């Protein structure tokens, strides 16, 4: 008699559902149980800021699949169900209301928490941590009544929420301890036009400014924040601090954690403990060039890791390699993006580089809708191999160029390779000169001059 | 005493002006003379169909630089001036109205002609060969009065002009001897949605149909065309036959021509004759994978070749390598594009391939403006190295993906490399699953099943 293998997945986000599907793809007979603390799975949390901003008309649009779809796929999702602990020796999990549940293979996909702002007043009402779609729908009504709000930290989510609140007509403040927005990953020249566009939208930016406290009224409601630069009266605070790995279960179970607090995995998404795989924001993954562990990547990284973890948990042999991190997001009136790292990170890590910078356009200069694009390439001195890239532009093609540049970095392309690359020229969709090519050739010309 | 070298350029299009600039970049003291038969240089002929279509408001928008810009750059442009012949032994050109003009280096950039339709009636008025901006402005007034027009052949220009005439409300016919549009380079599954969208625009398509004659009235004006499928009454015919190299001067001067009629050049854009370089549509260039000579590439190819030819004519040492041909263009309500070749060409050349096809979307499914994209990849059996790609989509990112895929082909990336590539996920600019990745993985899955 065939006894089906039982796979347990903790977490119902992109990593967890990717893992559940990965198990089924390799072993359709496996019993797959997914535990999530939330009411729903299979929606896009990444879309929440855009509903708040009014670009997307309703939260319903974010639902990707109904619950029946998972039933039909043979994936047993337990909603609003907390896993209390993992017994890796006994290969079981302790589930609230269910007791001990055995597993043959376990996949941890517990995701992230926002870093604790670490200031008084965190228990006040009026603090919004963007995550869950049902809470978001409730907060959306709050936003509709809000006159003044602050976004705490210009993280990727912070950027989106600043823009969204400004679009909604809320007096929007941004407080960040760094000298400019997204300073942990983006360069100041890339962010300058974004900040200009926020200024045009009426956003009040407070950089080099530390949050010191959330201040409440007698009813326990947020009325202001105190910062190193004084008090700012606000009724709503969006806490967009950086993501930290939700590693509580993993730590308690004795899984190896890395320097970021993320779970350490190999290329097969295996943890340090037999029978346990891990995927998504709970992990740390080495950067493809530097080996520096990265944490808090995107939904597409989580999903891809989940598929690999699930496949391998079911007996497959897939790998997920070090990452080159293409990224991109709208910000104010612009779209920013890049791959690997920019000057700020390279400098912080002590990585030498030469620069190649070009300005270009997305269509023929005369074609309606044409928008500027700035491309900045970082290359290894001597070999001129591409090691990083950042861009800011009107929108068109930033995502696709970021994907391309991440692949170019992975495969060792040089500034010379990019400078001689062919490009499509057709007035409505592409200019005579591709901005990546212009940047590469500007860099080569500057190097030739010494 | 320094005697400046004299470079002569024949042709004022993208290749010729690229060459003139290339000379000056290497040798600022060089005397550079450009001869053009036309009244203008430095405008974008590629934009003409979009002015006809109403997307661009006027022909003035297509002017890229004033005549003074060339004077300022030290480039002496002789307008409306015909070069009668080249004496390569004596290193001189015979110029109408100027007599014999000596050169130290000569760059031929004589461009293309439309292939002669080879049928009676080519001398009637009402036949429009899209090329010159001043003629285009005159023809635009004719189009405004035109009720019925035909586009002869669904070439790249033919596609643009069909769409433009339909947008202008002209009853538009398309006559082409092939079974579908752009059949010499695109695959039928890529063109099917384009043809559907033309049908919605009211275009009358006549495929598998040969043009037999232009028929005129007593005043020598076009009144109809005769085809293998009968007569079609039209007042205007846009002759969009394929491009042929304008090789008359080169042939008379004894330069080696290739199988396409294009001038044969090496990687330095040197012709078979010392002291003579050539660039642009007058050349043939080997395909990067097959070595098959290609002719009739784009303005960006012409410009890039011109820069190399000019630099080398001035004593530089630049190379322009075999091409992988990223291409793209709007067509009807879609944008099509690709790199290298598709199934039709691979089959015609006897090149074996495996297919990887994926359907995807340009943004998150729920984000306004999301459009579908179909990606088709051709890979070498066994190695699974990418050898070709074609796409059709709503517009976003086709150009950038075509650039990427051409580079991926050049650098030998495989379906596995593309299947594991990282991609940006951000709802407004990119979907969770990149269509290129989906296509590659679909192909790998199909191969795994045998």
Image (spheres, coloured by chain):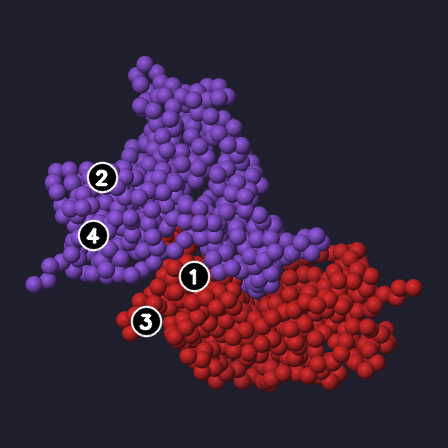
Chain colours: A red, B purple
Q: Residues within 10 Å of mark 4 (few under 14, many from 20)?
A: many
Q: CA distance from mark 1 to mark 2?
A: 39 Å
Q: Please report contact status of discs 1 and 4: CB closer than 8 Å, yes or no.
A: no
Q: Please report contact status of discs 1 and 3: CB closer than 8 Å, yes or no.
A: no
Which residue is identified by label 4? Answer: B105
User: Where does the image place residue B420, in percent across and percent down from the top left?
Assistant: 60, 63
Say yes or no: labels 1 and 3 on the same chain.
yes
Rendered position, A305 above or below B159:
below
Q: Residue at x 61, y 49 (%)?
A: B355
Query: Does the rendering let one see residue B299?
Result: yes
User: Which one is closest to the eye, mark 1 or mark 4?
Assistant: 4
Judged from the image, the secondary structure of the residue bearing numbered disc 3 is helix
Q: Please report contact status of discs 4 and 2: CB closer than 8 Å, yes or no.
A: no
Q: Residue at x 41, y 62 (%)?
A: A418
Judged from the image, the secondary structure of the residue bearing numbered disc 4 is strand
User: Where does the image place residue B13, in percent across and percent down from the top left?
Assistant: 28, 46
Q: Identify the mark at residue A447; answer none if there is no mark.
A: 3
Of B347 and A399, which appears nearest the observer?
B347
Q: Where is the N terminus of chain B found, in terms of image quarters?
A: bottom left
Say yes or no: labels 4 and 2 on the same chain.
yes
Which residue is identified by label 2? Answer: B37
Q: Residue at x 22, y 39 (%)?
A: B37
Which residue is identified by label 1? Answer: A393
Judged from the image, the secondary structure of the residue bearing numbered disc 1 is strand
């Amino acid at each position: 008699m065939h006894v089906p293998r039982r796979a347990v997945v903790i977490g119902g986000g992109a990593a967890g559902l990717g893992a559940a599907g990965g198990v089924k793809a390799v072993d359709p007979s496996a019993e797959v149980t997914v535990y999530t603390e939330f009411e729903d799975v299979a929606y896009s949390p990444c879309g929440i800021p855009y509903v708040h901003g009014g670009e997307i008309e309703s939260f319903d649009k974010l639902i990707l699949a109904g619950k029946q779809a998972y039933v039909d796929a043979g994936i047993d999702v337990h909603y609003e169900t907390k896993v209390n602990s993992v017994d890796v020796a006994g290969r079981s999990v302790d589930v609230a209301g269910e007791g001990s549940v055995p597993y043959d293979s376990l996949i941890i996909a517990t995701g992230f928490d926002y870093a604790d702002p670490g200031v008084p007043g965190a228990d006040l009402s009026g603090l919004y941590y963007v995550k869950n779609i049902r809470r978001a729908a409730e907060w959306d009504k709050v936003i509709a009544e809000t006159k003044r709000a602050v976004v705490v930290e210009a993280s990727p989510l912070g950027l989106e929420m600043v823009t969204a609140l400004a679009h909604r007509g809320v007096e929007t403040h941004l407080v960040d301890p760094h000298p400019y927005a997204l300073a942990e990953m983006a360069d100041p020249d890339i962010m300058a036009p974004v900040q200009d566009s926020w200024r045009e939208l009426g956003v009040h930016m407070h950089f080099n400014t530390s949050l010191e406290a959330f201040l409440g009224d007698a009813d326990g409601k947020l009325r202001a924040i105190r910062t190193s630069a004084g008090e700012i009266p606000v009724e709503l605070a969006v806490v967009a601090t950086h993501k930290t790995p939700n590693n509580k279960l993993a730590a308690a179970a004795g899984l190896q954690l890395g320097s970021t607090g993320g779970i350490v995995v190999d290329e097969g998404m295996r943890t340090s403990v037999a029978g346990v795989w891990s995927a998504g924001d709970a992990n740390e993954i080495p950067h493809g060039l530097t080996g520096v562990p990265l944490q808090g990547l995107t939904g597409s990284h989580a999903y891809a890791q989940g598929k690999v973890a699930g496949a391998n948990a079911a007996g497959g042999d897939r790998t997920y390699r070090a990452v080159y991190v293409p990224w991109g997001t709208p910000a104010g009136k612009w779209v920013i993006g890049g791959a690997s790292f920019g000057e700020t990170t390279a400098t912080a890590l002590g990585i030498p580089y030469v620069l190649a910078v070009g300005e270009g356009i997305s269509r023929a200069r005369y074609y309606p809708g044409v928008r500027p694009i700035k491309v900045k390439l970082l290359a290894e001195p001597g070999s001129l191999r591409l090691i990083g890239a950042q861009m800011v532009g009107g929108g068109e093609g930033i995502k696709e160029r970021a994907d391309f540049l991440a692949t170019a970095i992975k495969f060792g392309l040089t500034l010379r390779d990019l400078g001689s690359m062919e490009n499509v020229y057709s007035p409505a969709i592409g200019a005579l000169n591709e901005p990546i090519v212009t940047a590469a050739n500007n860099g080569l010309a500057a190097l030739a001059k010494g």
